[in-house]
Image: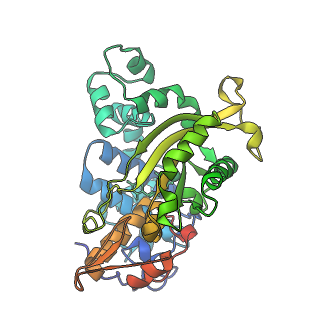
Amino acid sequence: GVSANPVHVKSMPQTMGTVSQYACQRRTTLKNYNNIFTDAFEILSQNYEFIESEGPCLAFMRATSVLKSLPHAIHSLQDLEGLPFLGDQTKDVIEDILECGHSSKVQHVLSDDRYKAFKLFTSVFGVGLKTAEKWYRRGFRSLEEVKADSSIHFTKMQKAGFLYYDDISRAVSRDEASAIGQIVEDTVHLLVPDALVVVTGGFRRGKEFGHDVDFLITTPETEKGEGILHNVINELKHQGILLYYDIVDATFDKTKLPSKRFEAMDHFEKCFAIIKLNKKLVKCDGQEESAGGKDWKAIRVDLVVPPVDNFAFALLGWSGSRQFERDLRRYAHYEKKMILDNHGLYDKTKKTFLSAKTENDIFAHLGLDFIEPWERNA
Ligand code: DCP
Ligand code: MG
């Protein structure tokens, strides 16, 4: 069972004190001393996701997150004593790795047909678990086989996913993200000079690479923001650098309570785009050959436009990591009887919404110490 309070550790020479079961009460930088274990756990947890085994999937994600937060490497099973979420299942894997350098369970998954196919299919933009399942059941094992079947109907998103696969399946570097940031910022400010443009997601947490670049855009005065996303998209189109876009209109209802789910899609107006980035605009380029000798690279970009009153919540929600977000919501729910989502925070005891101008305000409402973005790599 999971206790609601932090787990108390008696005999841990290296960590001392306690490790909370909530990622939002731990500081997790990108320095991971337990890579060999967390890499293994992440493969296992993804495999459980692919076979729709939610419990074990979550268990391995939580254990991964705890190990990432430790300021030292695990050298023996005794080092795990008192750590939350490191139960028998995860211990077996760690024991295997400590004894022979690898986990037989992981080897097995890596050579599994279903795992390999799902990993490949979900690497295509627009392909989720449902589609991967469908393709797998039809007997496909490679992207070539999928593309060759004329009876498959692809969504607009999937078509773009295949068209730009070589570029967008490759990681986005920090320099590429900055160049995209400059373009987005210039374009937004051309239209609304005092609009706020902030990079969120993995790059805000200090990551060197990401799978996309995430932005929040908001305007101090709501009226000036009318149609800003559509105008930005039109402007990017005019510049000839918009390869793909899908605008999702806001479905936001202020009077509704925040979602009770711990992982909810938000209702802000947003756009999933692919932008054509001229390589000349990237500070440190040239280390990798581009596909087909092009002088540009296709980059996945998410633009999210919350109203200014929800900005702090949107920023906190879009900065991640996913596990950090899950645990913020879980903590709010179980420890504070509050509901947190990307739009707001609701106090069920006081039956009122708690407003916030900054992320600091939200941590304060929750009675949490502020955790810097680069300490949220849970
Ligand atoms: N997010 C979330 N739940 C979702 C989608 C997003 O909590 N269903 C939040 C957490 C993510 C952030 O939004 O950290 C951005 O989503 P990404 O998928 O872009 O994740 P990252 O930016 O963290 O990673 P990557 O480097 O792969 O882009
Ligand atoms: Mg991202």
Q: How many marks?
A: 0
Q: Is residue 91 above or below residue 120?
A: below
Horizontal placement of 273 versus 116: left or right?
right
Q: Is residue 152 above or below residue 40?
A: above
Residue at 30% in and 21% down = 139
In the figure, residue 238 lies in which quadrant? top right
Q: Locate residue 172, reporting x and y percent.
A: 61, 45
354 vs 294: above or below:
below
Q: Nearer the viewer, residue 103 or 47?
A: 47
- Left or right: residue 275 versus residue 360 is right
Q: Is residue 161 visible?
A: yes
Residue at 36 percent of width and 15 percent of height = 149
Q: Position of residue 137 (x, y in %)?
A: 26, 26
* 339 sits left or right of 372 in the view: left
Colour approach in the figure: rainbow
Image location of residue 47, percent across then percent down: 34, 44
125 left or right of 8?
A: right
Task: Name the residue located 37 percent from the left edge and 47 percent from the top edge.
Answer: 46
The image shows residue 322, relative to residue 117, as above or below, that is: below
Q: Is residue 299 shown to the viewer in this render?
A: no
Q: Residue at x 40, y 62 (%)?
A: 323
Res. 331 image quadrant:
bottom left
- Which quarter of the rendered picture does the N terminus lie within? bottom left
In the image shown, does 219 or 206 lie closer to the viewer? 219
In this rendered view, identify the residue nearer to me: 159 or 248.
248
Residue 135 image position (x, y, % from top left): 31, 26
